Image: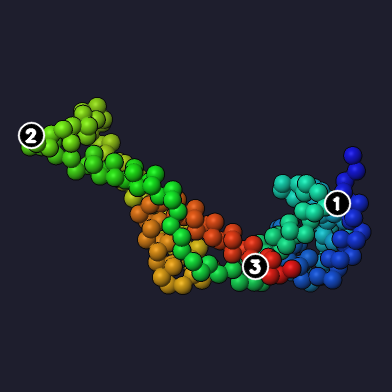
């Protein structure tokens, strides 16, 4: 079966010759070239790789995953261009301007509420509240004495690391102050669901940036 991308290799190489700065970014970032590169040309492309290089060296860059067809060439090359230019400091990361609370926080919120219940349920509650706290006291009989405390240490550590990562994303993508504070604080409380939403917003901003660069 013929490769639909390789069949258009000549045209694509000629088109990319008009964008030498992009080819230099490809070579330096995706080709892992640390030496100074002043010029680059694309010599071939197919569904799995593209070959670029300067006058002295050829670099083969692997598409992961491979291109499914010719229609994927432009969006993939644009996406790789944005990634390369951001990594090399040739372009500013797209700005994230909105905060959205994901519905998935109900899961981590429920786990945190359960942990609070296990932690603060009185051992000898008054008779009228005994039924409310019976599940917590029953479970604590069969858990190691350190289990609840260890759960808190684990939760605080993981959420702190996630909040720190959220902070770096907010700084990199220049969120407004209130938006950044919301993402960092809610990530510290609810963890991965909020961080996942921040990363989704990053992808939305990146796609918008790519479309504007067409």
Q: Which part of the image, by quadrant, shows the N terminus?
A: top right
Instruction: Please name the residue shown 43% across and 61% down the image.
Output: 183
- Separation of marks 2 and 1 at Cα, in angstroms: 76 Å
Report the colour scheme. Answer: rainbow
For marks 1 and 3 on the same chain, the one whose residue lies earlier in the sequence? 1
Residue on which the image places disc 3: 209
Decide if residue 87 is in sight here.
no
Which of 43 and 207 lies nearest the eye of the viewer? 207
Residue 52 is situated, as x and y percent measured from the top left of the image, at 82, 60
Horizontal side of residue 64 vs 86, given as left or right: right
Q: Quadrant of residue 41?
A: bottom right
In terms of secondary structure, where does tag 3 sit? helix
Q: Residues within 10 Å of mark 3 (few under 14, many from 20)?
A: some
Residue 95 is situated, as x and y percent measured from the top left of the image, at 55, 69
Residue 192 is situated, as x and y percent measured from the top left of the image, at 44, 50
In terms of secondary structure, where does tag 1 sit? loop
Q: Residues within 10 Å of mark 2 (few under 14, many from 20)?
A: few
For marks 2 and 1 on the same chain, the one whose residue lies earlier in the sequence? 1
Q: Residue furthest top?
A: 142
Between circles 2 and 3, the one closer to the viewer is 2
Are the residues at dot 2 and dot 3 in contact (C-beta closer than 8 Å)? no
Residue on which the image places disc 2: 127
Decide if residue 79 is in sight here.
yes
Instruction: Please name the residue shown 25% across and 44% down the image.
Output: 116
Give me the disc on residue 194.
Answer: none
Above or below, 139 against 98 in this view is: above
Residue on which the image places disc 1: 5
- Separation of marks 1 and 3 at Cα, in angstroms: 25 Å
């Amino acid at each position: 079966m013929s490769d639909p991308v390789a069949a258009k290799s000549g045209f694509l190489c000629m088109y990319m010759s008009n964008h030498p700065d992009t080819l230099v970014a490809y070579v330096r970032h995706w080709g892992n070239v640390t030496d100074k590169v002043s010029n680059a040309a694309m010599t071939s492309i197919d569904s799995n790789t593209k070959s670029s290089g300067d006058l002295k060296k050829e670099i083969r860059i692997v598409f992961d995953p491979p291109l499914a067809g010719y229609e994927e060439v432009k969006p993939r090359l644009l996406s790789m261009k944005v990634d390369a230019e951001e990594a090399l400091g040739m372009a500013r990361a797209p700005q994230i301007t909105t905060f959205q609370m994901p519905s998935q926080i109900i899961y981590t919120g429920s786990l945190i509420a359960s942990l609070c219940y296990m932690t603060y349920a009185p051992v000898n509650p008054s008779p009228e509240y005994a039924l409310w706290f019976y599940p917590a006291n029953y479970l604590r009989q069969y858990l190691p004495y350190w289990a609840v405390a260890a759960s808190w240490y684990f939760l605080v550590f993981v959420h702190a690391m996630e909040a720190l990562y959220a902070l770096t994303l907010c700084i990199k993508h220049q969120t407004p102050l209130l938006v950044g504070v919301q993402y960092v604080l809610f990530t510290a409380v609810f963890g991965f669901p909020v961080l996942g939403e921040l990363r989704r917003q990053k992808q939305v901003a990146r796609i918008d940036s790519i479309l504007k660069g067409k």
